[in-house]
Amino acid sequence: MSTSCVRFDKNIIPYDVLNLEAKLVNFGVCGSTAKFPENINNSSGWFVRNSYIVNAQDDFHMRFDSVFTVMFWAKFIERPYVDEVYGNRFILILDDGSVISYRIPDSSISIADWNHYSIIRDVDNIISMRINGMTVRSEVNSAPFDLTNSSYIYLGNSNRYATGYDVITDDILIFNGMLYDSDFSELPDDYIDVTQFKQLLYIISSTGEVWGYGLEE
């Protein structure tokens, strides 16, 4: 399974609306108000140091050798100190150790408010990092992105006294496709309708025929 959309219910239990076989376990992630609070059954996930969620599903893999999309909502908890040296970072680490990093300037967005973060690799291996739909960093890289190996995404700050140390996230989508091929201004105004990402097959066992379904353009 290489498609996932992680959310938290109001009891801070993580669930995956795309991977029904997921066995998500919460290690210390607290709850906060959902990005879209009108969905009363949802909360957001408040990540602090050494807190994480893990998928204990058997034979789980999340590797992308070509196109992929990662996008989510996030905001930072305000603390007394602003790290002017290192700053808050939006970082992608690929499996070969490649680092694609962007230092978030506090003047461009209000980091204590909800912002939309996305990382997308297209068919030409161009990786675009966007905040609120606008590209902040772009680089060509074809290395594997494997979240079950050495790859990861980092957001925030490692200084426990600085804003960005605690990060609240919601509606985390990881998808083996390309959602946007350019900058976009129309941000999601509710939890994503995941039916468009489901890959369904109809198998006729008597003939061995396999039929796929997808959205019409």
Image: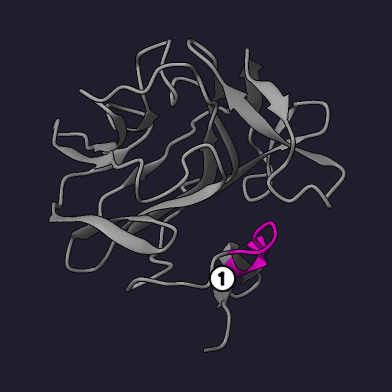
Q: Is residue 147 magenta?
A: no
Tell which residue pokes out farthest to the right in this image. Answer: 40
- Residue 173 on image: x %, y %: 53, 50
> Residue 172, how many percent across, how many down?
55, 44
Magenta segment, principal secondary structure?
Answer: loop
Image coords of residue 141 (percent x, y): 13, 52
Residue 170 falls left or right of residue 95: right
Instruction: Answer above or below: position of 171 versus 46.
Output: below
Q: Residue at x 47, y 44 (%)?
A: 110
Height in image: 22 above or below 38? above
Number of numbered discs present? 1
Instruction: Identify which residue, 189 or 83, lies in the foreground.
Output: 83
Residue at horizontal 60%, vertical 62%?
Answer: 198
Q: Is residue 159 left or right of residue 116?
A: left
- Could you tell whether 205 is left or right of 93 in the image? right
Say what amino acid the circle numbered 1 marks. Answer: Gly
Q: Which residue is mark 1?
A: 208
Per the rendered image, the range of residues in magenta is: 188-196
Front residue of 148 and 117: 117
User: What residue is drawn where x is 35% and y is 42%?
Assistant: 63
Element carrying mark 1: loop
Residue at x-position 63% and y-position 51%? 18
Other residues around mark 1 within 10 Å, as few (<14) / some (14–19) / many (≥20)? few
